[in-house]
Every structure is written in C-alpha cells, then in structure tokens.
Amino acid sequence: MPELVFPLDSTKKFTDQKIVGHNRWHPDIPAAVHVKPGDSFRVHCREWFDGAIHNDDSADDIRDAPLSTVHVLSGPFAVEGAQPGDLLIVDILDVGPIPQEDSGPLAGQGWGYTGIFAKENGGSFLVDQFPDAYKVIWDFSGGTATSRHVPGVSFTGITHPGLMGTAPSAALLSKWNAREGTLIATDPDRVPPLALPPLPQDAVLGALTGEAFTRAAAEAARTAPPRENGGNQDIKNFTKGTRVFYPVFVDGANLSMGDLHFSQGDGEITFCGAIEMGGFIDLRVDLIKGGMDAYGVSENAIFMPGNVEPQYSQWLAFSGTSVTLDGEQR
C-alpha cells in the first residue's frame, strides 16, 4: 500500500483533522502535503457534505443540505519542481470506500447515498419535474450496491473521484469570477442558479488564517463547476487506471481531490446523482516540464480514462418521443 499522506479520522469533522483541507479554489491556500515527481501515495477523502447526510429513511437532510460547505477536498498537494506552464501527470492507482470501516455514520463506511435536491435548496436540472427532496441509501458488498429504497436492484459500481484539479493562478481566478458574475447577472433568480459567486460563509481554506483568510474567502471560487483546472468534472470512467494531464498554474501545482463516487451515470442531473461516499484514493504524480507549450495545452485537463467497467449481458432500453410533459410536440 502506498504511504498515507493525508489521513482522515472518521470520528472527527473535516475541520478538526490533523491536516485540514479546503472547500474553495484559491492560489493562496497553502500546500498541506509535499510530494515529489514519481511518488505514489494514498489520500483519504471525506464525503462531500462532511457527514451531513445520514443513513436513514428521511430525505430531510437532503432538503436541508448545507450547500455552502461543499466540496470538502483533500489537499493541496504540492509537487516538487512544478511550475506554471508544466503539465502534471496524475495516475489513479486505486480508489474505494473507507478501508476497514464497514459500518458507521459516514457515507463510505459500508454505504453511500443518492439524492435529488429540493427546489427550495438549489434544485436540479429536473427541478420542475422533481421539486421535492428524495434520498436513496445504498449498502456496499464488495463491488456491488443494493438498496432498501430500490428493492430488487443490484448495482455494480464504477468507483471514481468526482472532483480533482490544480490550483488556479490569481489571474485565472479573477477570470472565473468575472465571467461567472456576468452569467449570474443574466438570470439572478434562476433555480438552479447559473453559477455560484464567492461566498465567505463556511469557507475552509486549509492553514490560511487572519487577514489572509478573510481576503481569500471573499474571492475564492466555489467548487461546483468544472473549469480550466479540472475541478468537478464528474466523469464516470475516471476510475482506477486513469491518467490525467493537468495544466499547472501555480508553483507546486497544488493538486486537490474529493467527492468520491461508488458509481455514477453520465453526469449528475439531480446534482447528487452519483452514489456519494467517502474513501481513499491512491495516486502517482509526475511532471512534463514546459508541457503546456510543448503540447499546446493552454487550458483544461486531458484525460486517458481507465478501463474498469462492469460486464453486463442483459439490458433494459427505453425509447423517447419529442413531446413535452404538457403534451406539446417539439
């Protein structure tokens, strides 16, 4: 097993850990751990709501989910020698639920969940069809999940991190805030919102304190969308065996990750549409010096997805028609 460099104690909140991660993007968040090119290491990741969602039969916790707190990310990991303009190579060696903890109050301790956010708390892309909160609990047995809320279904997972990325530069962060602010202004009351502006409330910025924390919290980017640094891309085949090439925007690259999924479809149209969990991820990192210019990568990560996927021999297929729920032909 690779060396565990970012441990999490399941009995403690994310902010009470020996090493505290973050839930916003900002170039000034200090590196929590330093690694070298060629290193392999293990990282613990907390479920994205830090235990706010419970293993019970009520969807009240989904309805009241604290969206200002997400995503809790492990990191940043500074890679020795990484400089702006380099490409950071990240190999996913393994990923899974919380090891040796098959029961407990945290998602990842033998269970996970799927949810639909209520219209009153952010909604989803199907908010008009599903305005209320829903929750399904899944129990893990090896690579299979079953649910008391969806009886008769046995689901084989494609386990992956929903979110991974490098830190933005100050210039890139400013670019994000400007363009997303312009987008929000086009329809500020939309549900779900078109974008999320910086929000100091509940910001977690690693080891930053005092005036540096206050300044960074006021401009730090939320982690909900994918961006040029990678981020919340929710790619279901981002599994064991994946290789990613991330652009480097700050010294050290400052890689972070989290939002582990037992499995997920193509995207998360309910915004909580994966089987969410905490767990571990084993990584190996390396560098291509000057790789952004050498390979014409001015922005956005390049993925070589893993080939871990269930083998199915039986399928259910459904056809659709171009008719709205109101009966209008389009």
Image (spheres, rainbow, N blue to C red):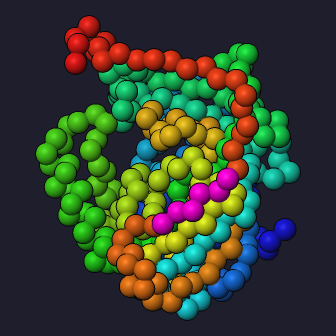
Give the extent of the magenta segment: 302-307
Instruction: Name the one closer to the observer, 80 or 31.
Output: 80
Residue 174 position (above or below residue 236): below
Instruction: Name the one closer to the observer, 168 or 201.
Output: 168
Number of marks drawn: 0
Residue 225 position (above or below residue 318): below
Instruction: For the C terminus, give its image quadrant.
Output: top left
Residue farthest top in this picture: 327
Residue farthest front in this picture: 313
Q: Residue at x 28, y 41 (%)?
A: 193
Within the image, what quadrant is residue 137 found in? Answer: top right
Residue 234, x across and y down, in percent: 51, 49
Within the image, what quadrant is residue 157 found in? Answer: top right
Q: Residue at x 45, y 89 (%)?
A: 290
**Left or right of residue 91: residue 168:** left
**Left or right of residue 76: residue 193:** left
Residue 41, x across and y down, in percent: 73, 73
Residue 143 position (above or below residue 315): below
Instruction: For the N terminus, give its image quadrant.
Output: bottom right
Is 305 included in the stretch rendered in magenta?
A: yes
**Left or right of residue 81: residue 309:** right
State whether residue 57 appears in this view.
Answer: no
Q: Residue at x 69, y 61 (%)?
A: 241
State whether residue 300 appears in this view.
Answer: yes
Residue 112, x across and y down, in percent: 67, 37
**Left or right of residue 99: residue 274:** left
Is 108 included in the stretch rendered in magenta?
A: no
Residue 277, x across and y down, in percent: 65, 44
Instruction: Name the one closer to the observer, 49 or 124.
Output: 124
Residue 165 position (above or below residue 235): below
Q: Residue at x 53, y 31 (%)?
A: 115
